[in-house]
Amino acid sequence: MEKYSLRSQLFSCATLAALGLVIIHFAHPQPLAQVLLAGMPWLDQLALGAALGLAIGLVSAVSSLRQPSAEAVQRTTASYARLDLSGWNPAWISLGAGISEELLFRAALQPLIGIWGASLLFLLAHARAYEFHRIDRAALLQASGVLGMALAFGLGFEYIGLLAMMVAHTIIDIVGLLIVRRLAARQGR
């Protein structure tokens, strides 16, 4: 099985970030700097984002590692094991996704289409990776989790700030990709 390279992942992230910046520039009444700097002071955002990311990441890790044979865990592992998760790649992929997805879905789209609209688009963007087309119990559980996470990120963006959600998203993804790497290695993927 051919792996998706770090370069292709980061290119996708750069494309999402560029789209977010274009939307903010042309469709928002506030200047870009005001959109990016809104919320609590940056140190508070860093601390809250890290705490949120670590808490959710820990729950995810314990859940996945306690039930590695669960259908949802197996599907997630199979899907994300297609990424090149060697070396530091989980950190780079997670940083790119955390920044670009929050920039697009929270900073650019949420003020225009609301928290539900942005969260549903976030869910749709992750549909292929989580195989939501199957419409079974595992897919519904995963879709509920992704939608719940998107709504939580949306609320965090509103009440804490963009930086906090970028940090939380990045940490959650790092933990998730490290779990995938570990489980995939056990399965010989």
Image (spheres, rainbow, N blue to C red):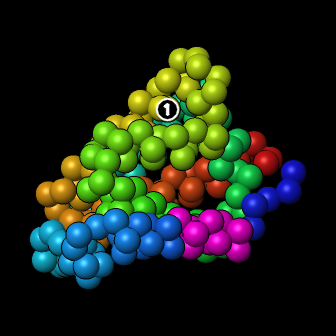
Element on which disc 1 rests: helix
Rendered residue at 14%/57% (across/down): 159
In-front residue for pair 183/56:
56
Residue 3's image quarter? bottom right
- In the image, is 50 to the left or to the right of 132? left
Residue type, mark 1 in image: Gln
- Vertical placement of residue 156 versus 46, above or below: above
Rendered residue at 87%/51% (across/down): 1
Could you classify mark 1 by the number of other residues whose Cα lies within 10 Å: few (under 14), some (14-19), or many (20 or more)?
A: many
Q: Residue furthest top?
A: 136
Q: Which residue is mark 1?
A: 142
**Residue 9 painted magenta:** yes
**Residue 176 painted magenta:** no
- Vertical placement of residue 36 versus 4, above or below: below
In-front residue for pair 87/157:
157
Rendered residue at 31%/39% (across/down): 116
In-front residue for pair 78/97:
97
